[in-house]
Each structure stands twice: as C-alpha cells, then as structure tokens.
Amino acid sequence: MRKIIQFVIGLLALVSFSAGVVAPALAEGGGTTLYLPLISKGPPLPPADEAAARIQVPPGFHIRIYAENLASRPRFMAIGPDGHLYLSLMNAGQVVRLPDRNRDGLADGTEVIASGLNLPHGLAFYNGYLYVAEGDKVERLAGPQPDGSFGAPERVTDNIPGPSGHSSRTVIFGSDGKMYVSAGSSCNVCEESDPRRAAVLRFNPDGSIPPDNPFANDPDTRRRPLWAWGLRNSVGLVVAPNGGLWANHNGSDGLGDDLPPEEIVIEVQGGKHYGWPYCYTPGVGV
C-alpha cells in the first residue's frame, strides 16, 4: 500500500514550503510510504490512524496518513502556488494533484494534471510554470490557471542523459534563477562515456546554457550544461537559506560494511569534481 504521511508540529502546522521547493517523496528502490510536512496553517488534526499508532515522533509532533493507495511508484512532491500538493508517479508517466479543499487534513482525491510523460521524477514550480524532470528531458507546463488547469507540456531541454542505470532526474531552481538538474550514473562503479552522467547540470529556465557555466562554449554540446560532477546519484537537491546548493552524495556500493557512507549531504559548487568513481566523500569521524 502506497501512502503519504503528514507530519504535524503541535496542533498547528508550523512547517511551510514556498513554491518551487522540492520534497523527496520516496528513495529509489525504497519502500512505499511517503512522508509529507503539512504545508498550511491551522487545519484540524485528523483522528489517530495506523501511522500514529506505529510511528513514534517527538513530543509536540503528530503524524497522520494524508493519502494512500497511490500506485505506480510515487516519487517527488512539490507545493504549488495554489497551496496544493503535487506528486510525480514515475511508472505511470503522470503528475497528479492531491488537494485538501475541505481543509480536513486529508487528501480529497487524486487529480491527474499531466500524463504520457517519460519517467517523471523531479518537480519544481518557477515563474508561472511547473517544471518536470523526466528520464530524457525537462518539460514545463504553464499553470496552475485560476481554474486549476495547466497548459500542455513543452520541452525545455533534452540535453540530459537518457534513462540508463539511475533513471531518475531531479530539477530545482537556485537562488541565481538557474535551473539545476541532477542525473545519476549508468552503473555502480565505472568511468562514464557521457559527461552528463553522475553530475549536476545547469541551465537557464528556457533550457539554454548560461554563459558562466564551466564549459559553456565546449565543442562537445553534452559538456556545456555541466556544473558539478563525480556525483554518483544525487537524487536530492535543495537550496539553503544562504543560497547554497546542496545535494545528497550516494556513493558506490559493495566496498564493505559501512563503506562508503550511504547518504552524505554536501554543498555543490560549480566547476568541481566530487570523487566518484575514484574515491568517496568521507563522513564526519570516518
């Protein structure tokens, strides 16, 4: 059973997301439960359910199921400018909306806003568009309109590697107004022939190449969007309050117990290599 679970601080929701923030819904190859910080102020706390009985949270916190019976590999979430939750269903090729219009703290249902997409994963709202990172491209949809509708998907860029090995693609907008897309490696440990793999790529919002990219004028057009590389599979991207771009650094597997540290969160800077496949990033105390 696939579920979204909401995490509430006290009786009021004190955790809020601004438009464009991406929340990881489910780690690739992981379980089927989604965790969601409640995103609006003052909704009633739904009655205790099996999540509340099963999952322990600190004093003053509460946890409830927000939506369940979600099929087709739910992946990433984003809060739209309309205050509703949007979710990518990777295997179904869909992006859906899970609204709570009656303000009871529970999703009213599942509304499909886009379908026929190729492995949709990362979602980001920016300047009147919903950007969707797919297995082989980034598309965007104008909206939401006042009636809740969206425009047809339009291609932003296909200068990203295709879905081989790590097939998820994540998109986020930085404090500089640029679009960042992460693409994982095609293997566990190897030297990639495509420079865009195991990397974070950087574009203008329309998909063009910023002139200050490290390889903006490279003869190999695949290198032009490169921002940082040597990152085996940075599924999660976030912009810190100071404007820094941070990513998780999932290192190579099979090196022995506790090696490498499975999830290292690092600040990603332009023009830098972060080790994979030649070395891994040590954790604190390692």
Image (cartoon, grey):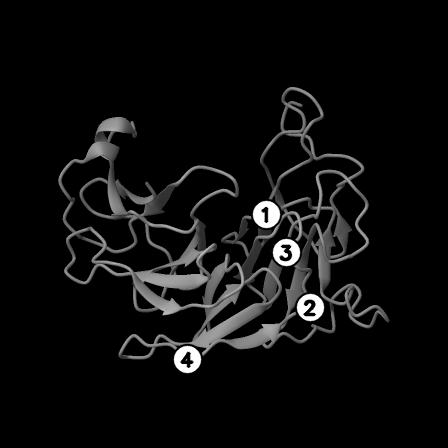
Please provide percent x and percent y for residue 263: 58, 35
Residue on which disc 1 sits = 247
Q: Indicate which disc, 2 or 1, sits on the residue closer to the N terminus.
A: 2
Q: Indicate which disc, 3 or 4, sits on the residue closer to the N terminus.
A: 4
The correct choice, above or below, for 250 with respect to 53 in the image is: below
- Count all numbered tags in the image, as a single digit: 4
Q: Are marks 3 and 4 in contact (CB under 8 Å)?
A: no
Q: Nearer the viewer, residue 256 or 61?
A: 256
Q: CA distance from mark 1 to mark 4?
A: 30 Å
Q: Indicate which disc, 4 or 2, sits on the residue closer to the N terminus.
A: 4
* Res. 177 visible in picture: no
Q: Indicate which disc, 1 or 4, sits on the residue closer to the N terminus.
A: 4
Please provide percent x and percent y for residue 54: 26, 27
For residue 90, which numbered disc appears in the image? none
Q: Quadrant of the N terminus?
A: top left
- The kind of secondary structure element at disc 4 is loop
Residue on which disc 3 sits = 163
The correct choice, above or below, for 245 with respect to 248 in the image is: below
The correct choice, above or below, for 21 with respect to 113 in the image is: above
Amino acid type, label 4: Gly
Q: Nearer the viewer, residue 9 or 179?
A: 179
Binning the other alpha carbons within 10 Å of mark 1 as few (below 14), some (14 to 19) or many (20 upward) gives: many
Binning the other alpha carbons within 10 Å of mark 4 as few (below 14), some (14 to 19) or many (20 upward) gives: some
